[in-house]
Amino acid sequence: MTLDDLRVFVAACESGNLSAVARELSRTQSAISQHVRRLETELGLTLLERRPRGVAPTQAGRILHRAAAQGLGHLDLALRELRDLRTGERGTVRVTTGATTMRHFMTAAVVEFRRQHPDVDLEFRTETSSRSCFDALAAGEADLAWITIGAPVRGVEQRPVVQLPWVLAVHAEDPLAQRESIDPADLARIRPIRLPENSVARAQLDGQLAHHEDETAAGTNATTSVADWDTAVLLAGIGLGHAVVPALPGWRASDHPTLRLVPIPGLPPLAVGWAVRQWGALPTLAQEFAETVATQATR
């Protein structure tokens, strides 16, 4: 067997679709299948079970996938460190996340990390969704992704860091601005400014509101949709509508005299944190950066 055989096999296990692996690696599906068949011939065992909608590892396949994924992860880490040694680089930490993350979660951490590692390069890549962040991890284009924690994703490990309570962002002259708190059932009567439908935060919020009988009405009264929480809060502050958003670090009422953030204690908090392919195979510098962000974010 070759490293290429193992890389293709691991990709097939994590994707669950040979056609998708072929597209990702710019190869034919026949070539991808040959890699898997070569492994099965050498081992004398069936590794992938063909299903109507793709493939899934057999018991033998799961054993090999677990060992191969860990081994390839450590090997890729070693090769990267050797490349840095050859070129004289001191190391790079590559992070992918949404547009508002740096402002609210990473500013202090970046300053602290830079103080400790002045020669390390920090590369930040902005994505518009958690799915895009996962794709960047899978393609080896990022070490870390800061995301809204959601359902398990094959080939990705998620680690919650902060729990964010929900608040209603509303103009200071709106009648709801005088409330000490908002009940989830009352959200049926607002004019919501909403995140995109493919947003993990939007999906989780809609799922929670579905427990309240009038939630459907809230969806039909939508005034507009936005790509990020900061924009939603900005529009709420000028009276365009109401925004149900997580209480992000750095939002202060004194900075927005026309805005009020009213707690919604009846909604479970939103978890945000890190996603990686494998924590055990993460470069040391990336681990340190992730820990620095977590420490600063939970202070």
Image (tube, rainbow, N blue to C red):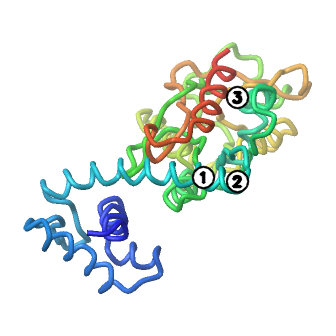
Residue at point 79%, 39% (across, down) = 119
Q: Is residue 89 above or below residue 113?
A: below
Give the mark nearer the N terminus: 2 vs 1: 2
Q: Position of residue 99 (x, y in %)?
A: 73, 48
Q: Secondary structure at mark 1?
A: loop
Look at discs 1 and 3 and give the one toward the viewer: 1
At 56% across and 24% down in the image, what residue appears? Answer: 163
In-front residue for pair 145/61: 61
Residue marked by disc 3: 248
Label 3: few (<14), some or many (≥20) within 10 Å?
A: some
Disc 2 and disc 1 in contact, CB within 8 angstroms: yes
Q: Nearer the viewer, residue 200 or 226?
A: 200
Where residue 245 appears, as percent x and y from the top left, is 66, 34
Q: Is residue 299 left or right of residue 151?
A: right
The local secondary structure at tag 2 comes to strand
The amino acid type, in three-letter code, at marker 3 is Leu
What's the amino acid at mark 1?
Answer: Ala
Residue indicated by mark 1: 142
